[in-house]
Image (cartoon, rainbow, N blue to C red):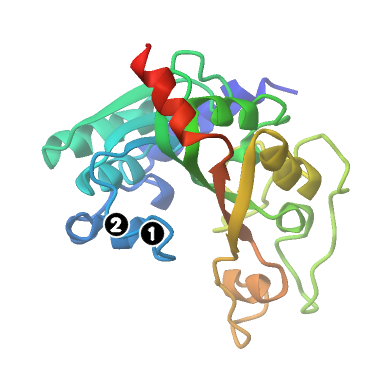
Amino acid sequence: MNDPLQHNRAAWDRMAANLHVLTRPASPEELQRPLQTVDPAGWLGASIRGWKVLCLAAGGGRHGPLYAAAGAEVTVVDLSPAMLERDRQTAAQYRLKLRTVETSMDDLAMLDSGYFDLVIHPVSTCYLPRLDRLFAEVARVTRPGGLYISQHKQPVNLQASLDTYTGQYAIEHAYYDPRPVPPARSPTKLREPGTQEFVHRWEILLGGICRSGFSIEDVVEPLHAKQDAPVGSFHHRCYYIAPYIRLKARRRGDPEQQQRIEVFR
């Protein structure tokens, strides 16, 4: 098997070059209402002005610029140089300030411990074969009391077939199989073209977040289901198999202790 990091970096570089929908920057209309765009659930309150925000595995000119437009001090981490270039271009176009760092989402050694008030993490854990280091690194760079908001592909979403001719979907990949899931045979909104993706069990996702030092406070399943959608379509499959889960978690610890640490840095 190819190195998944190198494989997925190349895949996302190609997607950026081909203007894939997931590599399109935030629109002017979205940048006029950035907080409402990034936080439809209201988890972040009325303002994040002055917050230190890490956009993890979130290049592409969307997340970073939106949080910067909302007044945050933004760092964008991504494995793909082409995706990070989208952030720099968008920031320059709208005169926004942000920092970009090219690295894997589970290698944050260049970032200070306890620095970020908020880590946002769009769907991407599926691109790592193992999550051993990921949540520990996120916890390390998040201050006590800080938030970690992440979105993941649900395991069964990656296990199940993408197509159906009978109105039913079949399990094609074992829950405990560590190998990449079978690639999509045709374009789909549920799989990113050319990437290697891995199923991660609920124990690894939810348990890993909790064991690393976070408490999960809320859970949302973004709704894409339509009961009357054509059989085999994106919305039809989402009616039977929920594709994503979005989690709000808070870093455990004493915020006052963190403030004392900051004084003596």
Residue 199, can we see it?
no
Q: Is residue 154 left or right of residue 221?
A: right
Q: CA distance from mark 2 to mark 1?
A: 6 Å
Residue 153 vs 195, above or below: the answer is below
Q: Are marks 2 and 1 in contact (CB under 8 Å)?
A: yes
Query: Does dot 1 land on a helix, a strand or a loop?
Result: loop
Q: Which residue occupies 23% across, 49% down?
A: 70
Q: Quadrant of the C terminus?
A: top left
Q: Amino acid at mark 2?
A: Leu
Residue 98, can we see it?
yes
**Residue at image mark 1:** 39
Q: Which residue occupies 67% across, 79% down?
A: 231
Residue 51's x, y, as percent? Answer: 30, 39
Residue 54's x, y, as percent? Answer: 40, 34
| Location of residue 126 by image quarter | top right
Q: Nearer the viewer, residue 28 or 115?
A: 115
Residue 12's x, y, as percent? Answer: 48, 34
- Sort mark 1 into few (<14), some (14-19) or many (20+) by Cα contacts within 10 Å: few
Return the mark for residue 150.
none
**Residue at image mark 2:** 35
Q: Which residue occupies 55% across, 25% down?
A: 140
